[in-house]
Amino acid sequence: MSHQATGAEIDAVVERVEEIGLKAELSRGEERTVIGVIGGNAYAYRDAFSHLGGIQEIVPITKPFKLASREFRRADTVVDVGGVKIGNDEVVVMAGPCSVEGEEMLLETARHVAAQGAKILRGGAFKPRTSPYSFQGLGEAALKMMAEARSETGLKVVTEVVSPGDVALVAQYADILQLGTRNMQNYALLQEAGRAGKPVLLKRGMSSTIEEWLLAAEYILSQGNRDVILCERGIRTFETATRFTLDINAVPVLKHATSLPVIVDPSHAAGRAEFVPSIALAAVAAGADGLLVEVHPNPAEALSDGAQSLTPPAFERLMRDVGRVAAAVGRPAL
Amino acid sequence: MSHQATGAEIDAVVERVEEIGLKAELSRGEERTVIGVIGGNAYAYRDAFSHLGGIQEIVPITKPFKLASREFRRADTVVDVGGVKIGNDEVVVMAGPCSVEGEEMLLETARHVAAQGAKILRGGAFKPRTSPYSFQGLGEAALKMMAEARSETGLKVVTEVVSPGDVALVAQYADILQLGTRNMQNYALLQEAGRAGKPVLLKRGMSSTIEEWLLAAEYILSQGNRDVILCERGIRTFETATRFTLDINAVPVLKHATSLPVIVDPSHAAGRAEFVPSIALAAVAAGADGLLVEVHPNPAEALSDGAQSLTPPAFERLMRDVGRVAAAVGRPAL
Amino acid sequence: MSHQATGAEIDAVVERVEEIGLKAELSRGEERTVIGVIGGNAYAYRDAFSHLGGIQEIVPITKPFKLASREFRRADTVVDVGGVKIGNDEVVVMAGPCSVEGEEMLLETARHVAAQGAKILRGGAFKPRTSPYSFQGLGEAALKMMAEARSETGLKVVTEVVSPGDVALVAQYADILQLGTRNMQNYALLQEAGRAGKPVLLKRGMSSTIEEWLLAAEYILSQGNRDVILCERGIRTFETATRFTLDINAVPVLKHATSLPVIVDPSHAAGRAEFVPSIALAAVAAGADGLLVEVHPNPAEALSDGAQSLTPPAFERLMRDVGRVAAAVGRPAL
Amino acid sequence: MSHQATGAEIDAVVERVEEIGLKAELSRGEERTVIGVIGGNAYAYRDAFSHLGGIQEIVPITKPFKLASREFRRADTVVDVGGVKIGNDEVVVMAGPCSVEGEEMLLETARHVAAQGAKILRGGAFKPRTSPYSFQGLGEAALKMMAEARSETGLKVVTEVVSPGDVALVAQYADILQLGTRNMQNYALLQEAGRAGKPVLLKRGMSSTIEEWLLAAEYILSQGNRDVILCERGIRTFETATRFTLDINAVPVLKHATSLPVIVDPSHAAGRAEFVPSIALAAVAAGADGLLVEVHPNPAEALSDGAQSLTPPAFERLMRDVGRVAAAVGRPAL
């Protein structure tokens, strides 16, 4: 429907769809309403709507995900996070510790990654852990520390939210809400995050197909939030030499299928710091719009995921190499 | 700790653990408190606790899941659902439609499955669907219909809950709370369900290892709820001839690893009704304590998962065959 | 073509196929020749052949595997191994050591499994091992020992062949040629085995789909050998609690898709002896035509796969239980 | 053992190993003999060999693959194919059609890829096909065409061999013997190829772990052939959006684990030409020593794998971009 379409016009279209015997699915976005029409030969009936007002365009969409599809929105979606643009030419690096363990270590890391060109600070306040006996994060205290680090360094902040009940709290502090791999199909959480008025970074479920991932994004988009960033972080396969298998193919596949920005988390995919730089550079060469990298001032003492965290000097080398590869594929230097 | 241990005795043990430099993890169950002690050679320090009161036993547990382990509880856990015992000798069948679509169809199905020997009625009120545009269930209306079907048939009721915020509502109507495959690592939901005072049927994540599954059970058990039923429902593999691959190995593996009852859902694993009976019989022969089967009065018209639902006559034949195979492996006839 | 079709009649049909612009694929079996006709609407041209002689029937086959399909041969294929019938009502058990390690141990095992009702002796002479440094089998010496064990016990003999160059040698001693999981797509070997005039037991590739498996069977069948036995032995998945994941679904799927007999190897699927009986019983309940089980007089000393071999007493218990479950699903007692 | 070690010295070491109760495994290479010593604490006995002659070095190797390991050979193995060096700084591109379909198309492709900087011509003469009814390659005729294309363009030639019986024939024409994904564990073929006196390009089994792959390489190396090139070509996962999932992690993992050169085949991994360039650039950025790319003058008419073949103009663009990314990661321009 056009941006100016009235409620009555929308109702009229829905009524017509149902008269024909097709099914109408309304997606009311902030900017406009999309009416999905589902049924065998739905597109064949397009002339049956020619007399109705408020229709901007009738587009045939055969994919199960609609709002996320390239067919629906041809131009790249650029997510603007307080001036940091994701999905644009620049390769945006988000870096920081797996968990926020304390003020000191967070600030030290934030200063370092900002100095190297990172634009966004990552850090876990609420951690979904496989075992109930593992460290689950510092919660709101960690959120406050991240907000302070933002004040000092100018970095934007991305952090995970794991429960619908925490969305409002996390949205108060974070610039981007991260939804993790175990929650990719936590629909209550997706919808709550979709309504929070903040960009959402949606990690791929570790065993989810790309289609399921885009359908999960659709849950957020259908709440009227168009600022979704997809993050490939490795899938579960039979291989045990690495923690997960980074699906590098996903980068070009997504660039064809959707307008949403695509970033890559090489740290979880590799599980070992020594493999992270190669994978990160591969992601940039493949066309990723950004990276999400774990950095820890002292990985050996990290409370979680130490083995995969880069040391500050390793991060410095990585950023230099990322700049070179980004330039080689036609993206401006960081 | 013994059942009579006081709060002071518990505190004293925890303090001693920390003095030694180990880590203490408290699991306060309804019946008793377990103090997990974690650290390199924790068991070597067992004499350091000999002077403290309230300790019933010191057991070395090397598995990451503790309360769920056979080492922790040797005897089979029998979950008593208002007189229907799961984990006992009898093979318990739970049957019904994928989604509750209306009062009529639910009652018709309930009467039929009860007449054939099923003890528990399954039916979806809240459906987690891959697409935001698919039918998501009738919600509380469906819960009321299930309660009515219980009144009429005497069947107990199991139904899924998908959001922490709905746990209290669902627990009001259901005899067993079902946690689905997409929510196996939704920790907020696991914990909320663990506190609801109802048995929990925990489906395996479609790409979760058995160890991760038992750790998810541990989230529930650590809330003091020992009535957890594990349900194998097929895992994601490269094979596309069936919807999922039933991991039949999981039945004996779980019987060795945990005291919890194990049931099998052949309907989701197969994805096609014609394959369901063979898989169901295999599950019983392998030692499963029960089955969760989809039955629909008219599968061709089902709003979800019609292809995998048994017709009433097919269910009748299955129940006869289940009785024979159960007897062959030494379980009383249904 | 009919059994009496002449070479000239066959040529005439092929010529006609090509005239029409379709592609003809000849499968010359011992009993008869099948002419596959490939092309867009091939079946629509069936009348174009009405004037030609020697044609028995024109059947539309849409599956990529033709000779293996149920559409091509509706009745179950029963493989007759010197009087032992596989694919008939009886559940046929093949048992013996992973590797033939010596005359004594082989004879001892053979006598035991024969006494318990096994009909076929399994044993490895040529072993395909992941490492070049592992024990690779005793070769022809082992084949001779198996032939001796056959003379003494009356058991038939199944053993693996791993190279096209060894097919003639192995066929001299064995009653059934086994093709292993690593060789399922070794097409030179499949074709050579297809020409050897002996039944072939084709194990599923550990990462092959059911369709690829049936296409591998097609390589054997297309050599004119219709005696192919399919053996499910577990597939590779992300689960590490067992060596492989037995795909129990494959049993009913194959029973629908093909006329060929289907047996199950629970030993490789489980990888641990304690899990083997449950899985074996599951296979029988699901409708398998037989089992392939590893038995070793002293598993702890086995040169290969000791952890998954049953002891003689465990095998005795298994055979008793197999008899019960087989009876429960309507198959005659062993 | 040192290069000058005599047979008697080798025998003496083996005898000593067995006296101690350990197991000796001889790998007689062309250049020297390696004696693997296997057993619980083998390395602890190193002094027990101090009095024996001909020993060059005693190295603790804990990996199951020995000759392939970085521990065994620290420096990168550079495979010299008639002057084209693989494993050196330069990124070497091998390109050509999936199957050799005729002289004209092969020459046309060869001239094009040579002009763009490819150094090696790929092309299938013997094709292992999933279905017995698919095009299986032109055999020796295709080998002759490749030899002609070599004469005209100066490109070296790589082509697949699928059966031990064909190794001698293929080695007569090819500069590199290719072993395909379905044959990675065809041990008879690995050994025959190891003895042919030509470099071997070993593709990863589509469901093989990296460790199994290195053990397959070990079969070749243990025949005295040290010129093995590893080729990652995608693994089988649950994802269906692409033909396979390229395991980009494998590049850095292999660079740590082995001295052998590592190349990547983006064409099979992607299965669709539009995704090939992104994946190819990712491989170069990750540190691959080369690429194996399918190019066809007219992909729409290819007899096999047309969907994944690049057109000549797409290949030209790819080569330009490969040069840029190679330079960005410090490798000389092609």
Image (spheres, coloured by chain):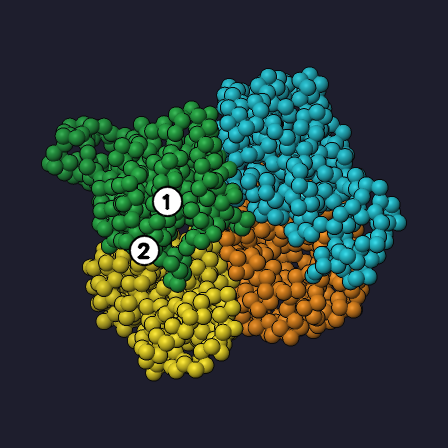
Chain colours: A yellow, B green, C cyan, D orange
Which of the two discs, 1 and 2, labels the residue nearer the N terminus?
A: 1
In the displayed structure image, the side of residue D116 where residue A29 appears, left or right: left
- Identity of the residue drawn at 66% across and 17% down: C153
In the image, residue C262 lies at what x, y percent?
Answer: 61, 36
Q: Chain of mark 1?
A: B
In the image, residue D186 lies at what x, y percent?
Answer: 66, 44
How crowded pointer 2 is (Cα within 10 Å; few <14, some 14-19, many 20+) is rated as: some
Q: In what quadrant of the picture does the N terminus of chain B appear?
A: top left
State the SS at label 2. Answer: loop
Identify which residue, D323 or C314, lies in the foreground: C314
- Identity of the residue drawn at 34% across and 72% down: A28
In the image, residue A301 lies at what x, y percent?
Answer: 30, 52
Residue that carries the numbered disc 2 in the rendered image: B138
In the image, residue D154 lies at what x, y percent?
Answer: 75, 67
Residue that carries the numbered disc 1 in the rendered image: B108
- Identity of the residue drawn at 84% across and 57% down: C15
Number of numbered callouts drawn: 2
Q: Chain of mark 2?
A: B
In the displayed structure image, the side of residue B272 where residue C202 appears, left or right: right
Identify which residue, C14 or C59, lies in the foreground: C59
State the SS at label 1. Answer: helix
Q: Can residue A51 be seen at all in this image of the molecule?
A: yes
In the displayed structure image, the side of residue C120 where residue D257 appears, left or right: left
Distance (Cα) linking label 1 and label 2: 18 Å
Labels 1 and 2 share a subunit: yes
In the displayed structure image, the side of residue C135 where residue C59 appears, left or right: right
Q: Amino acid at mark 2?
A: Leu
Q: In what quadrant of the picture does the C terminus of chain B appear?
A: top left
